[in-house]
Structures are given as structure tokens and as C-alpha cells.
Amino acid sequence: MSDLTFDGKIAVVTGAGAGLGRVYALLFASRGAKVVVNDLGGGRHGEGSSSKAADIVVEEIQRNGGTAVADYNSVVDGEKIIKTALDNFGRVDILVNNAGILRDKSFAKLSDADWDLLHAVHVKGSFKTTQAAFPIFKKQGYGRIIMTSSNSGLYGNFGQANYSAAKMALVGLANTIAIEGGRNNIYCNVIVPTAASRLTEDILPPELFTELKPELIAPVVAYLCHESCQENGSIIESAAGWAGKCTIVRSNGCLLRTKLSDKVTIEVVRDKWDKITDTSKVERINSIQDATGALVTSLEGLRSKQEGVEEGETDNYEFNNKDAILYALGVGASVAKPEELKFLYELHDDFQILPTFYVLPALQAVYMSNATQNAIPGKTVSLERILHGEQYLEIVGDLPQEGALVSKTKIVEVLDKGSGAVIVTDIEICNENGELIARNQIVTFAVGSGKFGGPRTGTKIIPCQNKPKRNPDISLVQKTSVDQAAIYRLSGDNNPLHIDPNMALLSGFDQPILHGLCTLGFSVRLILAAFASYDTSLFKACKARFMKPVIPGQTLRVNMWRENNRVFFETVVVENNSVVIGGAYVDLKSVSMQPLANKLATPELKSDAIFEFIIDQVKADPNKAKSVGGLFLYNITKDKKQAKQWTMDLKNAKVYEGTPEGKPNTTLTISDEDFILLAEGKLNPQTAFMKGKLKITGNIMLAQKLAPLLRANAKL
Ligand code: NAI
């Protein structure tokens, strides 16, 4: 293999007048880099200054045929050091933050000056140089940064509290710079050296001292700075011709409660302390995602292999009508639809619980069980990286409206898909008398847990079903609320991914997403509306595959195809036309479509979503609407027939379906399709008017003022 060179590269090494820095500078120069040899030339404790230290190293490099300039600034003025590189060589590619001092004292005797000076040189100095170089690295799409830490920081050392703290601060600094720079090919790593130098001459035993040559570490630092090295955000320890990587590990920990409703007490913590701190089995933590994880809150206790409900064990779930009502609100039931009042009012003559409520005990049972984590022999499945892939629910007995349920989980199949593992869990739910009332099957995909030598295909997954190849028989549309996930999570799925914007970002989403099971609850409720006249006793089973996330506030369209007692369905987000639930069906005991379904089966209009969006806009900024003013009536046509009417009462900042109370100032008639084109900006309103696609009666001038409101909808 060819030699690694640094031709054309500019390297800045701080504190390069002696010790490790000097050897780094010599090595870079010997491999073709032009080097800025920075050194303040002060004493071991940070006192004084002299240009001699840097000058001697520059002369040495030049004697060897290399190129170098001296810089005598303190690293605290880091930007001046980077300026030296730019003034002399026009660029900078490599920055080794190496300068350092010691002011050792036992902690009790440590003075403010001992603390401040230490932090100024190590932490502030590294910050200043790196911040000055960072934009240059970013612009050129390349940069390599080294921070110098110490075993005193990683593990502590008597008499070095100030030094330990500063050295550990550099690890934190490097961790974040590695994340922020990584995408621009700016890599930042930490070196933890042990070498003979004036800093260690009275610390290291004499017999070791002579063996710990800085020359044995310099190649490790130089490799980390080479453009071919892809290491980023790592802590590399090196000494005496050895190098290794340090990483953070965490014990498997232990569950502090067996039910979500259990309290965690100080006594429980005491009793489980041995298990909490048992590091005989550990997990490597590589990132904040690993540490906190998308499912951290709801799954926080499930790391332990020793605690909790084992496979085949049971989990208790207690509920009352308040839980059922909260769930119904969570899946979009509303008193605005009189037929749905029975899901929301416990004293209703016909109070009913939505059948999909019975996914909740199953989900809790899976959360409380360690079976998923231990599904693959010899491996611990990372719960943060589990995706809910498919859900099956079947009702087999009479459903109680309150009381206690017992759920039993069992992993029935684990498939090896290479990139991950498919884990199939069956959950049986029994009533207080032990009678089976419902079955669930949850199929999860454990990202990164594949390649364990298991079977690729299996027989236990209840299959999804393809929808018929014809237009849907019925489509129902409902907009979710921006608070939908905030409400739904109160039914037990507290995963912060659905509420916390930071957690959502960590999981790769721009904003919190709706629970897949919430979208399923919406869909099944609308299917019951269309094909069961909202009679929940007609529900038998449902199966769904979760395909894409829904953002709270988006509009769901459930496309339904009926064949005998089976209703195939797919759920689509209207705003971006993406299918979020597919391969899905609901089985009914029998179909009941009269008279409700006929009422509901009005053809769905695409413009509904735009009007829903306008409603949100107007609510968010009523003054903007009021500034336009006017009372508008929209006649939306479909197949040349009037299909829907919408009122935009901008004087009062109100938009609603139907006709206004008073006489509209302006009436606009347009087809559903053309309205979408207008909103998307693909149809010019003037052209539409001239071509007769848009008919306007009343105050035409006022209609022109609508343009900004409509243009805003082009986003859709
Ligand atoms: P050293 O004392 O031989 O070299 C440090 C150099 O930094 C000196 O030439 C000094 O003049 C310069 N310097 C000090 N303050 C400065 C400032 N404000 N601005 C510019 N230059 C300044 O020490 P050594 O052992 O080579 O240490 C290098 C780095 O490695 C330090 O950060 C040290 O904390 C770290 N380290 C060293 C270990 C070892 O075993 N030698 C162990 C762990 C960490």
C-alpha cells in the first residue's frame, strides 16, 4: 500500500514547541504538510512566554527540508493562530489542539486561578482555535481536528481536579463538533496520550518514562488527521506503541416497575441497586440516540433481562369508561357527529367502546415484557430501533366496558431479514373470569438486529390483503387535530416521539408524528360508520400494515372496498397523497349500511382538504382574514353537478361548509379539479375566469383580494 502523505495540506499544531506537539509537527512536515508551529513558550504551570520553543522546532523542520512557520500566540487567542496559517499558506486543513499546562493541587486547595487558567488553556484555547478554523473547513468541505484529553479526565486522578474537568470538557466538545462537522467532512477525534514529556516527568515512574516516547503516539494522531481516515467522534488512547478506542458503555439496567401504573419509590431503587449497577453485561452507547432513544419513556424499564414479565407471562390492565372515552377522543370521535356521542358519554343509553380500544392492553403487555428484547438467542434487541410494522386485532368474546383484563404475550416467530429482525408477538386478552375475549398480533421490525442465522420466511404472520383493483366503493375523509397525538398518548403510549419535537428530530422526523395505532383507530371507526352503522358489535377483526407516518393536523382519507363481510381499506394522507396504512381490512359479522352509509357516501372532494387548510390558516391568523374582509360563497362542482358549498366569512374570520346566513358579496363557482389547480398555482385565476372555468357573480373586485389566501395553499 502506498505511503500516506500530507502534500499540499496545512497543519496547525498548538503547543508544538515541546513534548508531543513537537513530534506531531515534525511528522506532519516530514510527510509533506506545511506546519504552523504554535507555542507560547511558557512554563509548565502556564507562567511566562518565549518565542524560543516554537523557533527551535521550525528550524528543525527546515533543516530536515520541510516547511514551517512559528506562531507565539497563546491558544486563548486561537483566531490569531489560524490567521498565521492563512497569512503564510492561504489555508488550513488540520488542527491539532495539543497545548497544555498543569496546576496540580488537591481539590480542597484548588484556587480560582488554578481552575480558570487550566480551563482557559485547555478548553477555551481549543474552542477558540477550532471555532476560527471551522468555517474554513466547512467552505472547503474538509477538515481534521484533534482534541487532546487525558486518562486523568476519563478516570480521575488525585490532585488533578481542574485538569480532569478540563480534559473531560474536551471530550464533550469533540463529540458535538463531530456531529456538527461530520456532514461537511470535518472530523473531530480525541487523543488520550501517555508520553514522556515535561508534564509527566515527575508523574510517571522513571522506568516507564523512557519507554513512553511521543514518537510512538504521533503516527496515531497523524493517521486520524489524514483525509483517508473516516474516524469521527472517537476517543483514541495511545501509549508505548499501542492504540485503542475508548467508548461509553451502560449496564443493562433493571426495570423499576412491573406495570406502567406502578410508582417508583426510593426503596425499590435501593432493593434493585445491585441489578442497576451490574456491569457484567453492558451495552455500548455510541450516540445520544442510543442513550435516550425514541422509545425511551415508554420502554425505559425494559432494558433488564432479569426483571419484568417473561415470555408467556401475563400483564394486568385495568380500565373504566373514562379510559374508553379518552381513547375515542384520541382516535377522532367527536360530539359533532350525533352518532358518535355513544362513544363519548358514559350515561348514553347505548354507551359503547370502540373495538380498537382492545389494542391498548396488548401494547402495554408487549411493553412490559422482556420477550422482545430477548427474542434472539445470544443477542439483546435494541428497543429504540423497533418499528411497529403490522397489527391484527380479533374480538372473540363479549367486551367488558370496564374492569380488569389479563394479557398474555408470546413471541411466535422471529425472522432474519438481514437488515433487521421481524418479531411476531401474539397477545391473548382474557376477562376477569379468564375467558378469552380478544386476540392481537403485533409484528415489529427490529432495525439492525438481523444476520443471526434465523429463517427468512415464516408461517405465523396473519397476512395482509391486497385491495381490489377498482375505484373505492366509499371514501371517508377526516382531518386529524394538531393535538391528536397529544390526546392519543394519554391512552398509554407515552413514546416522546409523538409529542416532543426534540425526540422527533432525534428519530429523524421534522416534527412529532401520530401513533400508527391512532391512525388505525380513525380508520376502523370510519369503516364502522360506513358499513356497520356504528354498531361496534358487528366488528370481528382488523389487520393493517403501517407504511408511512402521519403528522397531527393532516387529513386522512380512508378508501374502502366491500366484498361480502370484508372491507378492504387503505388510509391516505390527503395533503401529500401518501398511503399510510395499506394491505388492510376489517372483517364484520354482517354489514349494515342503512341509512347512515348512504348519507356518508357522498363523493369525497379534493377541495375539502384545501378548505380544511384555509380554516386552519384563518384560525391561526384571523386578522389576516379580516383584512381581506367580505362574505364569499363557493359552489364546488363535480362532474358538472354542484357537489358542495363552502362559506368564507372573512369579515368574521369564519370558514365553514354550507351557505352563509346573509347574502354573499361574491359567489364563485368552480369544479373540484380546477379549484385544486388554482390552489397549486397551476391555473391562473384570470385565465380560469376568461375561459369560463371560474364563474364569479357579485363583487368581482373583492374576489381578487382572495388571491393571497388561495396562493398560500399552493403548499398543499
Ligand atoms: P509539554 O509541556 O511538553 O508541551 C506542552 C506545550 O504546550 C509546551 O511547549 C507549552 O509551552 C505549550 N503551551 C502551554 N500553554 C500554551 C498556550 N496557552 N498557548 C500555546 N502553547 C502553550 O506537554 P505534553 O506532555 O507534550 O502535553 C501535550 C498535551 O497532551 C497536553 O494537552 C497535555 O495535557 C496532554 N497530555 C499529555 C500526557 C502525557 O503523558 N504527556 C497525558 C495526557 C495528556
Image (spheres, rainbow, N blue to C red):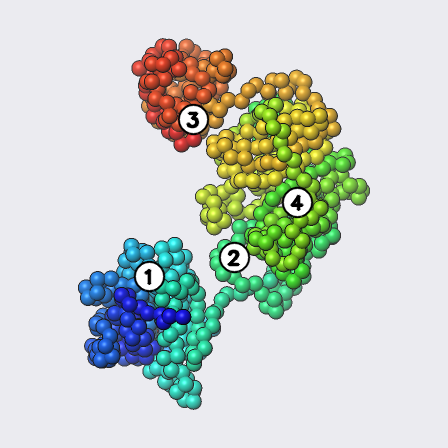
Residue occupied by mark 3: 614
Instruction: Check the picture and name the quadrant holding the N terminus.
Output: bottom left
Mark 4 vs mark 2, foreground winner is: 4
Task: Identify the residue shown where x is 36% and y is 58%.
Answer: 185
Residue occupied by mark 2: 290
Residue occupied by mark 4: 442
- In the rendered structure, which disc, 2 or 3, sits on the residue that comes first in sequence? 2
The answer to whether mark 1 and mark 4 are in CB contact below 8 A is no
- In the rendered structure, which disc, 4 or 2, sits on the residue that comes first in sequence? 2
Residue 310 in the image: above or below residue 162:
above
Q: Residues within 10 Å of mark 3 (few under 14, many from 20)?
A: many
Mark 4 vs mark 3, foreground winner is: 4
Left/right of residue 707 with respect to residue 409 in the rendered view: left
Q: Quadrant of residue 30?
A: bottom left
Residue occupied by mark 1: 143
In which quadrant of this rendering is ligand 1 seen?
bottom left
Kind of residue indicated by mark 4 = Ile
Residue 250 in the image: above or below residue 653:
below
Is residue 675 in view? yes
Kind of residue indicated by mark 1 = Gly
